[in-house]
Image (cartoon, coloured by chain):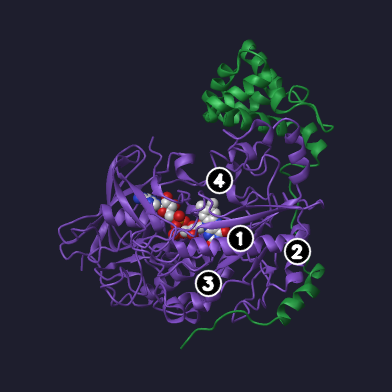
Amino acid sequence: MSNTHLIQRPLPEVVDVLVIGAGASGSVAVSELAQNGFSVACLEQGDWTPATEFAGDKPEWELVKQKKWHPNPNVRQGPSDYPINTDESDVNPLLYNGVGGSTILYAAHWCRMMPSDFQTRTLDDVGDDWPFTYEDLQPFYEEMERTMGVSGLGGDPAYPDEPSFPLPPLPLGKVGLKAAAGMDKLGWHWWPGANSIASKEIGHRPACLRYGACLTGCPAGAKASTDLTHWPDALEAGAHLVTGARVREITVDDKGLASGAVYIDRDGVEHTQKARIVVLAANGVGTPRLMLLSKSEQHPNGLANSTDLVGRRLMMHPYGAAVGTYEDELESWLGPAGQILHSMEFYETDKSRGFVRGAKWNLMPSGGPLGMRSGYGGRPVDESFGVNFHKNVKRVLGRSFEWGVIAEDLPDESNRVILDPELTDSDGIPAPKLLYKSSENTEKLIKWHVARAVEAHEAAGATSIETTELMRDCGWHLLGTAKMGNDPKTSVVNQWGAAHDCPNLIIIDGSVFATSSGMNPTATIMANALRSIRHLVENRATQPMSGE
Amino acid sequence: MLTDEQRAVYSRLADVLIPSAEGMPSASEADVPTKWINDALGYRPDLVPAFLQALEIGADGEAEAAVVRINSTDSVAFDALGVLTSGSYFLNPAVKELIGYPGQVPSPAYDDTATYIDMLAAVVERGPIFRPTVT
Ligand SMILES: Cc1cc2nc3c(=O)[nH]c(=O)nc-3n(C[C@H](O)[C@H](O)[C@H](O)COP(=O)(O)OP(=O)(O)OC[C@H]3O[C@@H](n4cnc5c(N)ncnc54)[C@H](O)[C@@H]3O)c2cc1C
């Protein structure tokens, strides 16, 4: 029997809109379109992941998280994953393939970008301005915060407005209070973290149970992954979802407009789904991969790629961290994980630091006793084992936490997603390859920020501090590979996500980011997706479509 | 599943990694080689080949030297041995109790804003820290 199941009802031969990818942005598109009377189908290569499968509430959690629930698809190697060649990348891309996309594994830090993030060229003479401002996106942030049930506290002086989150903040606990006291000593900004994790029951979701396992899927169902926040209502409203459907090409009609997609089901059978409009929501790696795979007479360089910008300007937010260990018992295995606090103290550019742009800091707990113990090989045995095994557990368990630094990396055309000439996925489709080097600006930025994070730990009374200046497994944020802008010569899509070369191809995932900001991007991805799709709905009368 | 011979080798290696010290039981005192390793191998079938390789490299000679030999000749095998042994140890509820770790148990969220609202007033007093949109 086929694993590909058509939920609810048979697919029409031609749909109004075909959405590729059922993750953060695709879910927004599907529910918005279905609720506005469009016939909409979504092709998703992965399947549903029921909360009962997650290990966060089970004793084996720390053992299985290093494989089955690893965020790196090259390590996880699940049935819906595709390989990504990272031989020439400083950073490994992290993602999840299935209904809900990477929100299944995300940490749910909910971060609006700052006003300056939309204007880096004007303000700092680097990167590019976005074709709209913070104020243009603000109402969509607000709406997404309600839909996602974000927990947080209004009044943060790091923002120009006072977002009133629908739920109160998650507990700071002993970890948050300890870190906040350190920040206060230094006079540095901190604020209770906003998280798309329910602090109280909301919609389909119960309140957080603080397993601290957000990054491996929430067993309580309290985290706002879009399989929970969007899909039930979207299906109810008439949307079609095809799981196990791996798209290998977006087709075009004789005018060069997108006319549907060819996909392969889990029995290896190829299907074609026709559509009047195609929406791409396959993330910053999956989307350029598909565009580069979709070569045609009308689009010989790949779909909507006359600029040769598709796949270029990849940004992945290199991550630095300082982990402090304290004498006090802090129960630092408790969630959320999740950001307990954030700090925007050093977010804005100060050229006297020797670099431009900045980073958001997030405070996170440190997990259970096994932690990330996996890289012992080659180091002296008695560093981690023997008597030190017990000493380390006593010293660190429950007594350590991390200040993490989300470093803004600036767009660089040589950082890119290309098609690997040899590597393929399990369906024989060429796999993506990443070419990515961290820049000098980013390296200076991380070094400087990590040094400040060390000071924050010292002020809070840490007895020892360990730092990482570039974590390899940190490519949580996949951005920039189909840049948005007003000029068709220097961008792939316009401010509404419509491809300049193919106006009925709408791109709504993180690929469209003009710059990366120093924020976790999902709030912006979802708000931008909503803005683009609303525009499509409101302008349906004049929207170019295939088959007209 | 491990043969008796493999289990005997493993037992010696596991006690080098996790000896009885600091008021904590050794791996074998905590039933790692006899019980918990079976569960751990089931949770991580991907590590089984490297684990067995570690046992093969470490089969002969004095246990401490054998552990050093595994580490210096095959770091992948050593990683598997290390992760599975520590992971098995922490599966034992008695060990969890001794280290004061409740494990993956629910701990409902609550509102603790009252404990820090005064501290936040100082953050607010320090004033806005963003650059507004340039129009
Ligand atoms: C471990 C981890 C932690 C993270 N933490 C945070 C955080 O705290 N805060 C935050 O803001 N962001 C976080 N992120 C990032 C966040 O998850 C992503 O930004 C967000 O999910 C991206 O949304 P998207 O719609 O662009 O793509 P995704 O959510 O990745 O969805 C893309 C979907 O497209 C599907 N797809 C791709 N190619 C094809 C194809 N050829 N055929 C069919 N289907 C296809 C995929 O299977 C996938 O389901 C985290 C990510 C990870 C992995």
Q: CA distance from mark 1 to mark 4?
A: 37 Å
The chain under label 4 reads A
For disc 2, the marked residue is A459
For disc 4, the marked residue is A50
Q: Give the residue type that dot 1 points to.
A: Val
- Colour-to-chain, green: B
Q: Position of residue A122 (x, y in %)?
A: 43, 81
Q: Earlier in the sequence, mark 3 or mark 2?
A: 3
Q: Secondary structure at mark 1?
A: helix
Dots 1 and 4: beta carbons under 8 Å?
A: no
Q: Position of residue A280 (x, y in %)?
A: 36, 60
- Colour-to-chain, purple: A
Q: Give the residue type that dot 4 points to.
A: Pro
Disc 1 with disc 2 on a shared chain: yes
Residue at horizontal 64 percent and vertical 49 percent from the top: A213
Disc 2 with disc 4 on a shared chain: yes
Numbered-mark total: 4
Q: Is residue A483 left or right of residue A448?
A: left
Q: Secondary structure at mark 3?
A: loop
Disc 1 with disc 4 on a shared chain: yes
Q: CA distance from mark 2 to mark 4?
A: 43 Å
Marker disc for residue A113? 3
Residue A367 appears in the rendering: yes
* Relative to B76, residue A205 above or below: below
Q: Quadrant of residue A126?
A: bottom left
Q: CA distance from mark 3 to mark 2?
A: 28 Å
Q: Give the residue type that dot 3 points to.
A: Met
For the N terminus of chain B, the quadrant is top right
Q: Give the residue type that dot 2 points to.
A: Ala
Q: Secondary structure at mark 4?
A: loop
The chain under label 2 reads A
